[in-house]
Image (cartoon, rainbow, N blue to C red):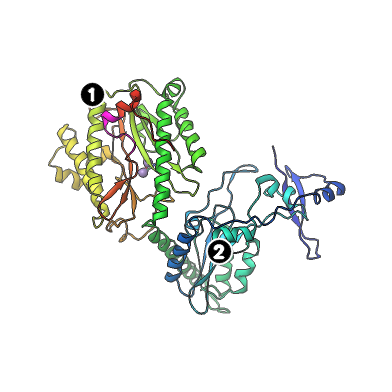
Amino acid sequence: MTEHQAETDHDGTGEAPVFRPRKNGQAQAVSDELAAWMRTGWADTEMRDLGPIEQAPYTAKRRAALSGRFPGERLVIPAGTLKTRSNDTEYPFRPASDYVYLSGDAADGGCLVFDPRPGGGHLVTAYLRPRSNRGNGEFWLDGHGELWTGRRDSLTEAGALLGLATDDVRRLPEVLGEAPDVPTRIVRGHDPVLEEVVAGLRARGGAAGPEAGTETDTADAADDAHAAARRDEDLAIALHDQRLVKDEWEVAQLQQAVDSTVRGFGDVVAALPQARATSERYIEGTFFLRARVEGNDVGYGTIAASGPNATTLHWMRNDGPVREGELLLLDAGVETRTFYTADVTRTLPISGTFTGVQRRVYDLVYAAQEAGIAAVAPGRPFTAYHEAAQRVLAEGLIEWGLLDGPVDRVVELGLQRRYTLHGTGHMLGLDVHDCAVSRTELHLYGDLLPGMVLTVEPGLYFQPDDLTVPEELRGIGVRIEDDVLVTAEGNRVLSAALPRTADAIEAWLAGGWTPPAA
Ligand code: GLY
Ligand code: MN
Ligand code: MN
């Protein structure tokens, strides 16, 4: 099916634009009779009575906290826009995480605006795409009209759902332009058109740009652009800082993401015979089915890496064979319909039991993960669990004769990293690698706080062409990854339901374990 492309056409009368359908760049004829007929005969579908979304009290608190950080400034937080996949088709839309965090909204093309109020605080408005106009044909002649993409919430409905004032997003450039002197920050990277609008305001001397009417030379303009970029970056950092500690609703969402993921891993094990007859794609597809049925999507590209493919960290081609006797490394996470993702890895012996050498590698990674999980507690440095896990791996590698001790020298020089390759984990939340730009003193070099959620995911990877290891190890890759909540007392492994020891995994593959039902 090819959708009509639309073109707006102002006739100079100030009335609503007329939509003219086009197909493959060519105007398509719509008779006046058909156009008139399509305007009539529709039942009234306005004004459903909708209650607030469950997270509305939480998003309100988050907005209040952000408001307190930027008194007197206008904040622009776009949802993002559709991205072209090919020609006139687009990728499924996934709203920007900061926008979701502050609004709970899932629609495309919207934007939150925090307008500073004279008495302090902000008025927050969600600028959204309204329902499609039936009077001018937009609803069926615009490729993004509701007849093509489905009913949208009206602005009134969206306001009731989100607990926010709403307005038509098409008015936003004009609204921003009406108050050009308000210092403005925008979260970049999601809506180039709005970024240009804000840049335009700054260039005109408003929105914390240069003084109106001042001549600026090129160097001044570059300095201004630099200062504006820094101010925008500060907003992004503030949001990621704020997202580091999850509220109780977010923790429940992450648990839901993990629970669905556990069921997805159960599906994959049940589908191993079909995967053996086809390829890693069968595994990816099997997990994806669970993600789509219970959630929104997968939270990142599934890594279904069989045999030596497991030594490629981001193996997402998933087109290799699934062979008896080899290991399958499955790194996958369901993203909930509220956009929180799990991030879990299990490494499974495809024929049901580990070989001696596979189990030896597995058990060392398991021991490292146990040491890592034990180091996750409030007040402990974020780096502690990485260091604990790496130390166990280094000790094991020394014991196997692959590295020369002592262990302090090995970890100081990072020599184990030839085989461990990556860090031991990261924050988890709306993004799989969550809060990536939060301040290092709060995150990478900070201490853990209750409410943080992170992954613990040590691994060992022996490349197929690595001549520094015995042949029996070459092509083996093992990672074990779990999602861990920092609690007031220590930690809680959100993915604890999924078998993890070598024995428990063999029992699972032998049919001795099935995931808890939804
Ligand atoms: N799935 C990517 C990661 O584990 O970080
Ligand atoms: Mn992962
Ligand atoms: Mn991870």
Three-letter code, disc 1: Gly
Quadrant containing the N terminus is top right
Which of the two residues, 317 or 168, is positioned nearer the viewer here?
168
In this picture, residue 285 sits left or right of residue 212: left
Q: Position of residue 423 (x, y in %)?
A: 30, 45
Among numbered discs 2 and 1, the one appearing first in the sequence: 2
CB of mark 2 near ligand 3 (< 8 Å): no
Three-letter code, disc 2: Leu
Image vertical order of residue 200 relative to residue 374, above or below: below
Dominant SS of magenta comes to loop
Quadrant housing residue 18: bottom right
Membership of 433 in magenta stretch: no
Give the CA separation, mark 2 to mark 1.
60 Å
Which of the two residues, 191 or 336, is positioned nearer the viewer here?
336
* Mark 1, residue position: 356
Image point (24%, 58%), residue name: 379
Q: Report how many numbered discs are placed on residues in the image.
A: 2
Image point (49%, 70%), residue name: 224
Which of the two residues, 353 or 196, is positioned nearer the viewer here?
353
In this picture, residue 17 sits left or right of residue 310: right
Quadrant containing the C terminus is top left
In this picture, residue 448 sits left or right of residue 136: left
Q: Position of residue 37 (x, y in %)?
A: 83, 48
**Residue 32 seen anywhere in this rendered image of the structure:** yes
Which range of residues does the magenta coloring cover?
497-504
Q: Position of residue 7 (x, y in %)?
A: 74, 52
> SS for tag 1?
helix
**Residue 475 seen anywhere in this rendered image of the structure:** no
Which of the two residues, 229 or 450, is positioned nearer the viewer here?
450
Number of residues whose C-alpha sits closer than 10 Å to that of mark 1, classed few (under 14), some (14–19) or many (20 or more): few
- Classify the position of ligand 3 by quadrant: top left, top right, bottom left or bottom right: top left
* Mark 2, residue position: 164
